[in-house]
Image: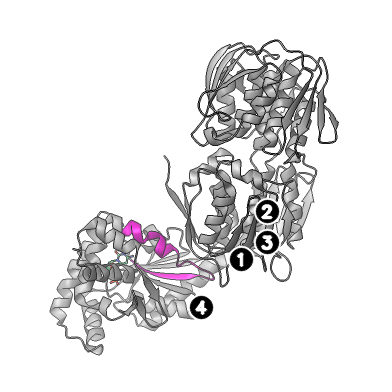
Amino acid sequence: MSIDHLDLPQLCAARGTVHLPGSKSLSNRLLLLAALATGRTELGDLLLSDDTARMLAALRILGVGVEPGEGKALCITGVAGDFPVRAADLFLGNAGTAFRPLTAVLALARGDYCLSGVPRMHERPIGDLVDALRQLGAQINYQGVEGFPPLRIRPPMPCSNDVVQVRGDVSSQFLTGLLMALPLRGIETTVEVVGELISRPYIDITLASMARFGVEVRRDGWRRFTVPAGSAYRSPGLVQVEGDASSASYFLALGAIGGGPLRVEGIGPDSIQGDVRFADALSAMGARISAGAHWIEAAAPLVGRLRGIDLDCNHIPDAAMTLATTALFADGPTTLRHIASWRVKETDRIAAMATELRKLGASVEEGADYLRIDPPVGGLHAAAIDTYDDHRMAMACSLAALGTPLRINDPQTVAKTFPDYFARFAEVGQAVPVIAIDGTSASGKGTIAIRVAQALGWHYLDSGALYRLTALAARHAGTAWDDEDTVAAIAAGLDVEFGDHAIILAGEEVSDAIRSEEISVGASRVAALPAVRAALLFRQRAFRRSPGLVADGRDMGSVVFPDAMIKVFLTASAEMRAMRRHKQLIEKGMAASIADLLLDLRERDERDSQRSVAPMQQSADAELLDTTNHTIDSAVAQVLDWVSKGLQKR
Ligand code: DC
């Protein structure tokens, strides 16, 4: 099932241990090399995600043997450089680490293949790789736009060229693909890199992976790479895949911002993955980093906040996205330079990141190949983050939860490299605590909730006020309370400010207006409409800010804050509630009859508890508090007692 959004509570701390999924870069390289090799390879801790699934599916279609191995390992039976299936259509989604090297390998193989992907893949340039392969006799045609996938590949023409030139300044994956394919030629071939080679650490991963499979590339600086004659891949048997260094960056940043210590397991400081250097960048920002052979740990500075930095990110292009959101928590601006390659990734990451950081309240300057981020003054804004079908946008932006409640749209995009990212995130992030006080109308919820919030110094949410405001705004707009779509749009766009003693709707003080009996009835009507409830959900969750929230309503514990630390269901006899409401109204100088109020209350209880969405009900994990015979003081004392026990357990 795809979910269209995920609401993250504000986190007050992050600590613990995360076992990392296998590296994406290593997994897809090792899969392809194992497929091309002679012999059988067992790959342990391989990443199982969308990108590796694309590679695996393609290899299976090409006739490579893939079977489960011990535990989570996969066994690949190689084809010794010659795919048995000579004609195939391969769909590779948005997996650049599958598309580029498969293009190179298949262009030097002996079949007739079509390679395509999702629309974004068809916007990602591949012309530089195709130009290089054509120098070696490859026959590749563009099926759509010149220079971009989809591609049709036919068997190469005989060709004895032993030098090939490839551009290195757009994507290092072109050089990677070419190098991995060259052993298929059998003759010594030298690659000359034209232009500055970007993302060099990824070339190190390529060379190290090829070496594991018996092919030693001779490297002359970062300009010339030679694959010797007679090179052929041989399986080394068992290969253990390191944890993903880019995936590690999110958790290290969480530890650095959220206190820590937060440990990632499966990777050490000597990793061949370039993104492991992200830890140095965090350290430059003032985070405390420690490490062992197979783990790295991050914690916040002992005193003060993280520092803003000015960094050339060429060596950590992917993990640099994590720095962009870490920068929101620094004491000054951060500038990330040399990141032009972001523009041709899953999305234009420079533009996307600038847009989302601005939603969170940061000032962002966007250049052709840099971003400068000034943290928001006065805290992060709650925002709904778009993820652009880009796993790293989703994961990098999730860090903002350390400063604000957050909505992540299309969160399942993380499946590209880290399918259970948000489950791991929830394990190490400590959410701001919530006390949910639900119950019947006029049971004293509001009074008790405010008193509890004051006693703790926490924020307070009167969720009923949002339904009341919606009813009032609908009335002002001349909209009927049962016109679901229009009322939901009104709810979504409410221009409301909650002051200490006043509620301002579109510039007008409405604290008393929303308490009239007429609007009480309207609130109960609009609250029964599912689209209205959905429209108000994130607005309510956005109240969950440090150090804590006391929320009162009907579905605080069941729907809005199901993970609330303490849930209370408050009620009192209908007669007692009618008397209390009567007293309140008389004190405010409003006329009222107890009999009418009793009737109204019963009708509202009925509607609130019978409606199909989020009906008022005592959830199994809620404490029942009947205030018929309680004073306010004793009810408040009871709730505070539950809270102190709840806080002790955290
Ligand atoms: O708590 P209150 O009386 O101010 O609530 C006004 C109306 O809004 C009430 O009829 C129930 C509805 N409501 C709701 O459905 N869900 C909430 N969380 C809060 C109030």
Q: Secondary structure at mark 3?
A: strand
Q: Is residue 333 above or below residue 596?
A: above
> Can residue 569 be found in the magenta stretch?
no
Whole-number angstrom distance, CA of label 4 to CA of label 3: 33 Å
Q: Amino acid at mark 2?
A: Leu
Q: Nearer the viewer, residue 373 or 570?
A: 373
Q: Quadrant of ligand 1?
A: bottom left
> Which residue range is magenta in the image?
533-553
Q: Position of residue 389 (x, y in %)?
A: 50, 43
Q: Gap in Å between the C-alphas at discs 3 and 2?
A: 18 Å
Q: CA distance from mark 1 to mark 4?
A: 26 Å
Q: Amino acid at mark 1?
A: Pro
Nearer the N terminus, badge 1 or badge 2? 2
The answer to whether mark 3 is within 8 Å of ligand 1 is: no
Q: Residues within 10 Å of mark 4 (few under 14, many from 20)?
A: few
Q: Residue at x 70, y 36 (%)?
A: 172
The residue under label 4 is 457
Q: Name the disc covering residue 375, or none.
A: 1
Q: Look at the image and tell me whether residue 346 can be seen.
A: yes
Q: First in sequence: mark 3 or mark 2?
A: 2
Quadrant of residue 59 in the image? top right
Which element is circle 1 on? loop
* Residue wearing tag 2: 252
